Each structure stands twice: as structure tokens, then as C-alpha cells.
Image (spheres, helix red, strand yellow):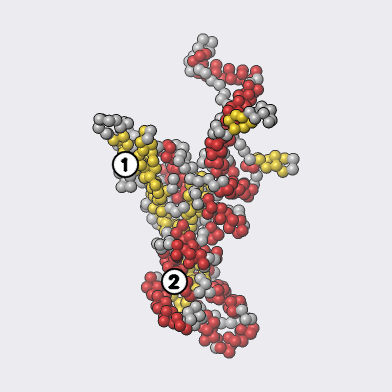
């Protein structure tokens, strides 16, 4: 089951309704303390537990702890859930809602309660049959006043937090990665067609594994039932009878109390991971955070290897403890898992986002009115995605993390401008500014449009006469330049060079002086531009200073 939309309101930093349209894979990006984790927490509170009650929340979860504010969390499914009310009779549930509110009247007035609703797309309640339909009996309907447990159990919610505590992913933890895998393994184990040879090897006598397991457990219990064990069992029973007001001597039949052996699923859930180092066996949960993180990620990769599907993953900062190469590897794993599972993750790493999949990126911010989100308004058609794939460069992914963005045609400006900024005592990193080059003038519009669609403050630098346009394309280039200039009307800071950066430098320094710099700093124009920008004896060109000051402000 796939979630189409989640709406959150009144939860922690989320004051006004936050509507998140979910893709198969979703990346939440934003500054610290802007509310990213609150989005994951809200989802997990109501979908990640067997029983969701008013105790799943408290007043600290309510925005500003406001007495009159309700927490409202609802989900719309891509395809309605088919609830089987009676055998062969199904009711569609396209939407569910959880409301943490207060009783308004009566003896309980003021006390918190949790409402669980099944809704149609128009927010009217889903109706069910009052009784099983029968011929000749007028149909009567009632609103479905709770969310069926089987709906919540239809897809597991797996949470991987920043603590990377291995205990949370072991089989015994509900909705853990291993717990989800073990349920599937146990289902296969309990299949009566899953056979094991019993008796002497080669006898050919086969028995369902589940039957052999039950026999083995019974044998083990008989072995464990020592005199001390039996005495303990008897003592507990007798004391329980006394507590209930019965006489153990005459009313022993009123209570049958005994130790029950493990079921196969409980046996799987009891398994723990150990690491053997030399002659020592160490419980993996006792190892350091980095080692536990490695095991958690290994379990995540195993989930992907087994091609399990239908789960919802909530992951905080997958990049933690990982060097860049491993970050890239884990991102590939996440994308593979995302083919058959839905994923929402928080990241601060450009290795976990990519420009071609811009529709999966969610920018999270916070102001006086709480947490807000923004997704791209561009249509994510395959034509545009393929165009971005041709220009794939991990450094360009940094644009999504920028507070202010400057887009340039090539590497020369990208290398020179930060060096000039240092000489002007401006640190782009400290103010959250980023420069990206886009591989030529013809790509400028697409990247500017992408930045604007996310609401990222953006500037651009372009050459009027660019080598990207040949002599035969000058009319086309003139129209392109008009389009670039028009972005100034949409809040874009537009900076224009005559020909290119080098020609502007020749005009400023004079051609003779610039040629001398070329001899001094080498033929590679990108490296030369950087070295010249670093040299305190070389004046900073007038045409550069406004660009640096805008980006550094």
C-alpha cells in the first residue's frame, strides 16, 4: 500500500496544515531545528505502532502546548484500502485521520482523547453495513468509527533514527528491518509444503518443518521440566489461586497455569546478533556506535537483496558515520529499496539527492508560523529529467542546500569568485551561499527555472556572446539573452559579461597586462583565473565586486 499524501497540523513545530505529496522516494532537506524530524515523528506515531491511543501523544507534542490546538494527521492512499467487512464484501477506505483533541462537554470535558476516522476523499465518513446484507432486508449503514487493525498491519513502518541503536532493528523490535524479514521467513517456515527429512539420513521420511519444530519444542520442554521447574510452576499456580480467593487444595481446577513454549515466530524474534573476535563472543548491541551503524546498514542492504516490498521506511540522516564512497553506495541501496517500498529520509548530504530526481526533494523551513515545506513546481517529465541526467554532477546537488545560489556557465567563474571573496573578507560557506556551474550557456535557463521552482534566491552570470552559440545561431542567442534578462523581473539577480570572463579581464587590466598574467600563471584558464584571484598584488576587477557582495550578503 502506498501513501499519496500526508497532512500534519498542530504537531510540535507544525502549526498550520502541512501537506506533503509523497513520491516513491522522498528527501527532506533543511536547516537544523526546522521541523524535518517532526514530520517523520508524526508519521511514525500513528502508523508505527500496533495500538495508537491518546497515550501516543502528550501536551508537549501540541504546537506551543496550546490548550485549544488539536493534532491532526491524515493519510490519503494512492489506491483505496479494501476492507473486508464480511466475507466477500469489501468497503473502500481511501483516507484515514488521527485527531488528538479534547472532550468539549460532559464529565470528561477538557481531557484529551484520540479520534480515529476512515474517510472518503470528500472527508465524509466511510459507511459500512449495519449487518450482513440479506435478500428482502432493507440495507442500513453506519459510519466506520475506527481504523481497522488489518489496515495498519498491511504495511510495516520501519524507523531508523540517528542513534543507530541496533536493538531497534533486531527481530524482537516491532516493525524493525529484521522483524519484518523474520515474519516473512516464519510464514515460509509454517508452510506445510516446507519439508525436512526426519529419522535416519537417507530414509526419505519427510515432515513439515513446523511439525518437526513443535515436536522438538515439546521434547525440549520435557527435558527442562526438572523437579525444581515443576515445583516453581506449582508454587506460582497455588499463589495465584490464593490471590483470586480460591482454595488450592479443593479448587485447583479453577485455574490452569503453565509455561508456554515459544512459537516459531517468537523463536525467530528472540534471536540476537553476536560478533566473534578470536575466542570471544560479543553481543553486537554492546559494540560502538560506528560498528552498530555498519550492521544496521548491512541489514538494510540485506532487505534490498531479498527484494522485500510494501514497507514504509523513515530514515534520519543515512549519511551518518559514512565516508563519501559509502554514502554514494548507500544512496544506491536506498533507491533500489525505493523501487518496491516507500521511503522518506532526512539528509544534509548532497550525495543523497540528485538533480534529475528533483521531484523527490522537499525543502523544509521554519518561520514564526512554524514549519513549512516546498516542492518544485516544475513538471517532472522524462524529457526534463533526461536533460538533467546528461548534466549530472554531484557538486551541482549542493544547490538544494543553498540559502543563496549563483549559477554560472563554466568552471572559471566558479573557481575565481570564492578566492576574490576571501580577499574581501567574505566567506560564502558561513552565509550558506553556493556557486554551481552548469556546463554551458544553453543550460542556464533550466537550472534557473529549477531554483525558482523551489524558491531558492538565485542569481546568474552569463556572456552575451558565448561560444555555445555558433555564428549561425546569433539570432537564437539574442532571443536566449532576452529570456535570461527577463528573469530580473522574477527576482533573479542577473549579471552580464560582454563575451566571457577572460575578455572582461582583458578590458579591465588591458590586454598587454593580462597577457603578462597568462605567461606568469600558465595556459590553463580555469587554474589561471583561480591563481590570479588569490594574488593580493592583482586588483579585484570592478565587475566582480557586485557579484561577490550580492552572494555574500
Q: Label for residue 268?
A: none
State the residue position of label 1.
125
Q: Which of marks 1 and 2 is nearer the N terminus?
A: 1
Q: Position of residue 87 (x, y in %)?
A: 38, 33
Query: Outermost residue, right direction?
Result: 279
Does 322 appear above or below 219?
below
* Residue at 45 percent of width and 69 percent of height: 446
Which residue occupies 50% across, 46% down?
309
* Quarter containing the N terminus: top left
Q: Do the residues labelled 1 and 2 touch (CB within 8 Å)?
A: no
Quarter where residue 232 is shown: top right
Q: Residue furthest bottom?
A: 512
For the image, the number of numbered tags is 2
- Category of crowding for the residue at label 2, using alpha-carbon neighbours closer than 10 angstroms: few (below 14), some (14–19), many (at least 20): some
Label drawn at residue 445: 2
Instruction: Name which quarter of the figure residue 227 lies in.
Output: top right
User: Where is residue 291 shown, x and y percent of the image?
Assistant: 64, 48
> Is the residue 427 above or below the residue 164 in the image?
below
Amino acid at each position: 500500500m502506498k501513501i499519496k499524501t500526508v497532512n500534519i497540523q498542530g504537531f510540535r513545530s507544525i502549526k498550520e496544515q502541512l501537506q506533503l505529496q509523497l513520491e516513491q522516494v522522498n528527501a527532506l532537506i533543511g536547516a537544523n531545528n526546522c521541523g524535518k524530524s517532526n514530520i517523520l515523528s508524526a508519521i511514525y506515531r500513528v502508523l508505527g505502532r500496533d495500538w495508537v491511543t491518546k497515550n501516543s501523544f502528550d501536551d508537549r507534542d501540541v504546537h506551543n502546548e496550546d490548550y485549544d490546538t488539536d493534532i491532526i494527521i491524515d493519510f490519503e492512499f494512492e489506491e483505496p484500502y479494501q476492507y473486508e467487512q464480511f466475507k466477500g464484501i469489501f468497503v473502500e477506505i481511501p483516507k484515514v485521520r488521527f485527531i488528538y483533541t479534547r472532550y468539549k462537554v460532559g464529565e470528561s470535558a477538557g481531557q484529551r482523547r484520540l479520534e480515529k476516522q476512515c474517510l472518503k476523499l470528500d472527508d465524509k465518513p466511510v459507511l459500512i453495513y449495519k449487518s450482513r446484507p440479506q435478500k428482502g432486508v432493507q440495507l442500513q449503514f453506519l459510519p466506520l468509527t475506527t481504523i481497522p487493525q488489518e489496515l495498519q498491519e498491511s504495511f510495516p513502518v520501519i524507523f531508523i533514527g540517528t542513534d543507530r541503536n541496533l536493538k531497534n532493528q533486531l527481530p524482537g523490535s516491532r516493525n524493525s528491518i529484521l522483524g519484518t524479514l523474520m515474519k516473512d521467513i516464519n510464514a515460509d517456515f509454517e508452510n506445510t509444503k516446507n519439508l525436512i527429512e526426519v529419522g535416519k539420513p537417507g530414509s526419505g521420511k519427510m515432515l513439515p518443518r513446523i511439525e518437526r519444530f513443535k515436536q522438538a519444542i515439546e521434547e525440549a520442554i520435557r527435558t527442562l521440566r526438572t523437579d525444581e521447574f515443576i515445583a516453581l510452576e506449582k508454587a506460582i499456580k497455588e499463589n495465584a489461586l490464593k490471590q483470586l480467593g480460591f482454595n488450592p487444595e479443593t479448587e485447583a481446577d479453577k485455574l490452569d497455569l503453565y509455561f508456554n513454549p515459544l512459537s516459531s515466530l517468537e523463536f525467530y524474534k528472540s534471536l540476537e546478533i553476536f560478533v566473534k573476535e578470536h575466542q570471544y563472543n560479543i553481543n553486537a548491541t554492546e559494540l560502538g556506535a560506528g560498528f552498530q551503524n555498519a550492521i544496521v546498514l548491512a541489514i538494510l542492504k540485506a532487505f534490498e537483496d531479498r527484494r522485500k516490498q510494501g514497507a514504509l521506511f523513515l530514515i534520519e540522516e543515512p549519511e551518518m558515520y559514512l565516508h563519501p564512497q559509502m554514502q554514494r553506495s548507500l544512496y544506491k541501496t536506498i533507491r533500489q529499496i525505493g523501487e518496491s517500498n516507500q521511503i522518506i529520509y532526512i539528509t544534509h548530504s548532497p550525495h543523497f539527492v540528485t538533480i534529475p530526481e528533483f521531484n523527490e526533494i522537499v525543502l523544509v523551513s521554519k518561520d514564526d508560523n512554524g514549519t513549512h515545506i516546498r516542492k518544485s513546481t516544475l513538471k517532472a517529465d522524462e524529457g526534463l529529467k533526461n536533460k538533467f541526467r546528461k548534466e549530472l554532477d554531484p557538486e551541482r546537488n549542493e544547490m538544494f542546500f543553498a540559502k543563496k545560489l549563483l549559477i554560472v556557465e563554466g568552471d572559471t567563474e566558479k573557481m575565481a569568485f570564492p578566492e576574490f571573496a576571501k580577499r574581501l573578507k567574505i566567506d560564502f560557506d558561513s552565509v550558506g551561499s553556493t556557486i554551481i556551474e552548469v556546463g554551458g550557456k544553453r543550460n542556464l535557463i533550466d537550472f534557473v527555472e529549477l531554483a525558482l521552482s523551489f524558491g531558492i534566491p538565485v542569481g546568474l552570470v552569463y556572456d552575451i556572446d558565448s561560444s555555445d552559440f555558433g555564428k549561425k545561431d546569433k539570432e537564437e542567442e539574442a532571443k536566449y539573452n532576452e529570456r535570461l534578462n527577463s528573469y530580473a523581473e522574477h527576482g533573479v539577480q542577473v549579471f552580464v559579461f560582454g563575451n566571457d570572463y577572460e575578455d572582461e579581464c582583458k578590458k579591465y587590466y588591458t590586454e598587454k597586462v593580462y597577457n603578462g598574467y597568462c605567461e606568469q600563471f600558465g595556459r590553463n584558464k580555469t587554474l589561471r583565473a583561480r591563481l590570479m584571484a588569490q594574488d593580493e598584488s592583482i586588483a579585484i576587477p570592478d565587475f566582480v565586486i557586485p557579484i561577490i557582495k550580492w552572494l555574500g550578503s
